[in-house]
Image (cartoon, rainbow, N blue to C red):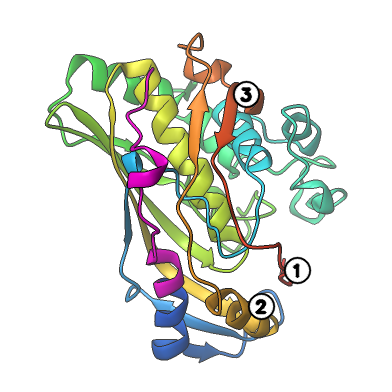
């Protein structure tokens, strides 16, 4: 698929991410008790969504240098139902390695993220009468056969396994991935709702991987990309990230890069990180932002 990016000289810097950080700084409420053991300045449902016209480039932040292939590898793993740390790692994603050995207290096998994890929800959602549903395979067929519907939806959430209590069977409850696709004026648009958003660390990676997902969906359905909308429930900045956020906000956003896909891949589940190439990326230097797992 030939993505219709504007030329570099015509793309404009996008300030939505920086403005989101400023919004939390100004209007956030300090939540002193979190599962991470550190306070967080939090906005619940009040942070405006970010709306990205992908012709202006891929939303890969420039306030600090970040990678892109690891987050795309993670998305490819989850699309294919990977739920153990070894399975996720086989796609080239090492982001979950710190969770090795956890989950046995929930009755899970070692290194199993659980039936409430992303891969299990996206690829193996339990259905009445037995068996499982591949949600993305279903939504692709629906977009192809019934493009005008408003029901092109995917969820990462399995309440039976994700709620705290005796039925919990997930090491980390899904934080993102509530998806709604819609075809408007011949373009495929996508909204991603995020339950829990670590704005300095997690969200930049999520921005990249879900923009890449929209491009993947466009390539396999034949529609050019429209807008990618990123909306939030609980958006927060942890206390140990305040200094790094100030440094990011002292820098002016630069033009977004572009992302090219291997045009030979027409099966959503065949995409891998090596099928993507980022070009025209000119970020500010990297910043060591503390992570609060």
| Crowding near the residue tagged with mark 2, few <14, some 14–19, many ≥20 C-alpha atoms within 10 Å | some
Q: Quadrant of the C terminus?
A: bottom right
x 65%, y 53%: residue: 66
* Earlier residue among tags 3 and 1: 3
Q: Is residue 120 left or right of residue 149?
A: right
Element marked by disc 3: loop
The vertical placement of 265 against 113, above or below, is above
Residue at mark 2: 244
In percent of width and height, residue 159 lies at: 47, 51
x 62%, y 43%: residue: 68
* Earlier residue among tags 3 and 2: 2
Q: Quadrant of the N terminus?
A: top left
Query: Are circles 3 and 1 on residues that touch, CB within 8 Å?
Result: no
Give the label, 3 or 2, closer to the camera.
2
Which numbered circle lies on residue 288? Answer: 1
x 78%, y 38%: residue: 85
Where does the magenta region start and end? 1-19
In percent of width and height, residue 80 lies at: 59, 25
Say whether residue 173 is visible.
yes
Spatial separation of the CA atoms under disc 3 and disc 2:
32 Å
User: Of helix, strand and loop, which mostly describes the magenta segment?
Assistant: loop
The vertical placement of 16 against 100, above or below, is below
Of residues 61 and 153, the one nearer the viewer is 61
Which numbered circle lies on residue 272? Answer: 3
Q: Is residue 94 left or right of residue 59?
A: right
Residue 2 on the magenta span: yes
């Amino acid at each position: 698929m030939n993505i219709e990016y504007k030329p570099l000289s015509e793309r404009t810097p996008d300030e939505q991410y920086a403005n989101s950080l400023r919004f939390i700084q100004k209007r956030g409420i300090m939540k002193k008790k979190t599962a991470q053991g550190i306070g967080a300045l939090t906005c619940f449902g009040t942070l405006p969504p970010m709306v990205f016209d992908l012709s202006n480039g891929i939303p890969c932040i420039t306030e600090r240098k970040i990678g892109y292939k690891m987050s795309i590898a993670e998305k490819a793993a989850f699309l294919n139902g990977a739920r153990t740390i070894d399975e996720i790692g086989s796609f080239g994603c090492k982001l979950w390695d710190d969770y090795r050995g956890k989950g046995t207290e929930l009755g899970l096998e070692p290194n199993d993220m659980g039936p409430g994890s992303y891969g299990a929800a996206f690829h193996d959602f339990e259905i009445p009468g037995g068996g499982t549903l591949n949600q993305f395979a279903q939504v692709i067929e629906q977009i192809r056969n019934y493009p005008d519907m408003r029901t092109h939806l995917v969820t990462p959430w399995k309440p039976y396994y994700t709620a705290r209590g005796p039925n919990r069977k997930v090491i980390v409850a899904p934080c993102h991935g509530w998806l709604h696709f819609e075809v408007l004026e011949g373009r495929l648009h996508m909204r991603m709702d995020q339950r829990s958003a670590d704005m300095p660390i997690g969200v930049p990676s999520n921005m990249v991987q879900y923009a890449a997902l929209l491009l993947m969906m466009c390539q396999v359905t034949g529609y050019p990309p429209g807008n990618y909308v990123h909306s939030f429930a609980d958006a927060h900045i942890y206390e140990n990230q305040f200094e790094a956020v100030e440094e990011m906000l002292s820098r002016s956003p630069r033009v977004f890069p572009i992302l090219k896909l291997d045009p030979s891949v027409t099966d959503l589940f065949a995409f891998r990180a090596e099928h993507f190439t980022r070009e025209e990326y000119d970020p500010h230097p990297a910043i060591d932002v503390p992570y609060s797992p």
